[in-house]
Image: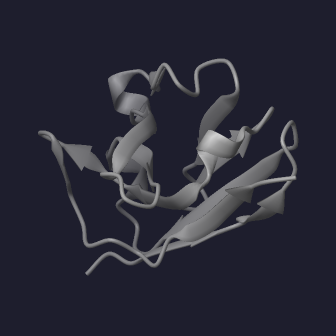
Amino acid sequence: QVQLVESGGGLVQPGGSLRLSCAVSGSIFRFYTMGWYRQAPGKQRELVAHASSASSGSVTQYADSVKGRFTISRDNAKNTLFLQMNDLKPEDTAVYYCNSPIGGSRRWAWGQGTQVTVSS
């Protein structure tokens, strides 16, 4: 069973930066599209960025709300997914999760997530 462990969240001022990491157990990471999701209080979980596998062209896509500020990347040798978040805004406050998006759903059980709070 695949396990997902997110880390790197914290409290940051508006305009600040954070880098999130997601460690994926097993050796299947490189075969799948991977994504970062977030869930703000009282809102549905949303997919904010995803990166396809190398065999699918290593394509990255972003939600409009984070485009130009967030960068998703992956280290297939270390089974790790990253999310570099710059110019953070209060509306980015949420619990961030990683998973593999598939058909409008996700492939694996959720990890514990990592809290990101943007506040002055």
Applied colour scheme: one colour
How many labels sit on residues?
A: 0
Which one is in front, 12 or 107? 12
Q: Residue 92's spot in the image, x, y percent? A: 61, 44
Left or right: 26 as drawn, with respect to 21: left
Res 7 seen here: yes
Quadrant position of residue 28: bottom left
Q: Is residue 74 left or right of residue 98?
A: right
Q: Position of residue 14 (x, y in %)?
A: 84, 42
The answer to whether 71 appears left or right of 38 in the picture is right
The residue at the point 80 percent across, 64 percent down is 11
Position above or below: 98 against 33? below
Is 9 situated above or below 100? below
Q: Quadrant of the N terminus?
A: bottom left
Res. 80 visible in picture: no
Q: Which corner quadrant of the image does residue 114 belong to?
A: bottom right
Q: Pick the residue in front: 117 or 22.
A: 117
Q: Return the x and y of residue 43 as percentages of the image width and height.
A: 35, 52
Could you tell whether 2 is left or right of 72 in the image?
A: left
Residue sitting at x 40%, y 46%: 34
Q: What residue is at 70 percent from the left and 26 percent from the top?
A: 69
Question: In this rendering, is residue 35 above or below 8?
Answer: above
Q: State the image coordinates of residue 25 (x, y, percent, origin top left).
A: 44, 75
Q: Is residue 8 above or below residue 86?
A: below
> Which residue is located at x 35 percent, y 44 percent?
46
